[in-house]
Image (cartoon, rainbow, N blue to C red):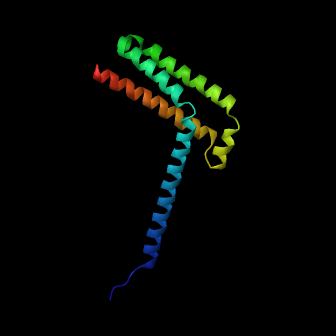
Amino acid sequence: MVHLDHSRAGNCAINYTVTAITIMRLIKTIRLAWTFYRNFLLLSATITAVCIRIFWINRFTGFFGIFWCKILSLALTYYFINANKKKEYYYYLNLGVSKTLLWASTLLFDLALFLGLLILVYQLK
């Protein structure tokens, strides 16, 4: 006769449910951050493309200028989006995503993408 421990099976089901809920929340947060990032994606992509082109031509001689140009453009983007779209933050907040999380995730993603492209261009040339 086989004896099953139902408490262990119940704990396993609970762990699976908690994991599934956590993953669904993470996906929801990523989708909301992407929706927010699309507000300034074109501007950011244009500035990144210009910086990458300058890096392609000048290599490391203009790196610090390019890097600070990108940082300054991100700061200006933050200022203008924050000033012009204040009421949009309520939408994200009602869905469980704070303003800080939105900005931190999108700015870190944009900066990581920029640095990744710089490394790729350096490897290609």
* Residue 36 falls left or right of residue 48: right
Question: In the image, 103: left or right of 114?
Answer: right
Q: Quadrant of the N terminus?
A: bottom left
- x, y (%) of residue 106? 53, 35
Return the x and y of residue 7 as percentages of the image width and height. 46, 76
**Number of marks in the rendered image:** 0
Q: Which residue is at the far right?
A: 87
Please report the residue visible at 38 percent of the width from the left and 10 percent of the height from the top. 61
Q: Quadrant of the C terminus?
A: top left
Rendering coords of residue 34 (x, y %): 52, 40
Direction left: furthest residue = 124
Which residue occupies 61% across, 28% down? 78
Between 41 and 3, the one lying in front of the other is 41
- Kindly identify the residue that appears in the image at 39 percent across and 16 percent down: 55
Q: Residue at x 53, y 50 (%)?
A: 28
Q: Is residue 42 left or right of residue 121?
A: right
